[in-house]
Image (cartoon, rainbow, N blue to C red):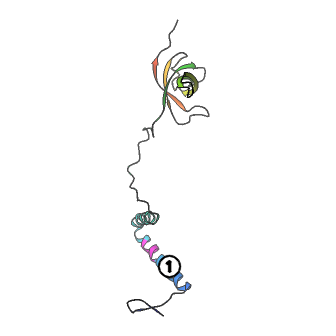
Amino acid sequence: MAEKKGGKPTEKKGAAAKVAGAAKTAAKAVAEAVKHPVETAKGAVAAVAEATGAKAEKRGPTPKSNLPRGRRRAFQGVVRSDKMDKTVVVEVVTLRRDPVYGKYLKSRERFKAHDEKNQFKTGDKVEIREHRPLSSQKRWIVSRLIEAAKVE
């Protein structure tokens, strides 16, 4: 027997006694969880957060589905093709500065954008916004008409 500083004798536990003690503790926890399942789940989350050193987060209400998540990019461009059904090809021209010479260079990129009502025609100036993938190549949606095409 070993003695503590206070003078009380303590017994060393063997491996079997430790396992038996852990099993009793687990059985008590399961019995408590059966009685109060919701409170036990909250306590378990708090215990895990405390053990990992993370703060337990309180989540607010879930966001409404019609609100966009994060910031969506938007470009202005000209419709180059409207031959597909509910899809237009929009050409966006941007100016970027050459890092070495400082000269501004035009870069052209074409995006396939969703046009639900087939209302945009070739030559229209439109604004497109980023969107979830609608097909293998469509990740943009036409948000508004800026200027209609000039008919000659």
Residue in the image at 53% along x and 24% along y: 102
Q: Nearer the viewer, residue 52 or 32?
A: 52
Point 58% across, 23% down: residue = 108
Picture layout, residue 120 above or below residue 73: above
Toward which corner of the image does residue 37 lie, by quadrant? bottom left
First to last magenta residue range: 28-32
Residue 30 lies in the magenta stretch: yes
Amino acid type of the residue tagged 1 in the rendering: Ala
**Residue appearing at x 48%, y 80% in the figure:** 24
Predominant SS of the magenta segment: helix
Tag 1, which secondary structure?
A: helix
- Identified at 51% across, 32% down, the residue is 130
Residue extending farthest to the right is 136
Q: Is residue 92 above or below residue 132?
A: above
Residue 114 in the figure: left or right of residue 28: right
The percent coordinates of residue 10 (x first, y second) are 45, 90
Return the residue nearer the eye: 119 or 55: 55
Query: Mark 1 Cα within 10 Å, few/some/many (few <14, many 20+)?
Result: few
Rendering quarter of residue 53: bottom left
Residue 36 on image: x %, y %: 40, 69
Q: Position of residue 90 (x, y in %)?
A: 55, 23
Q: Nearer the viewer, residue 147 or 37?
A: 147
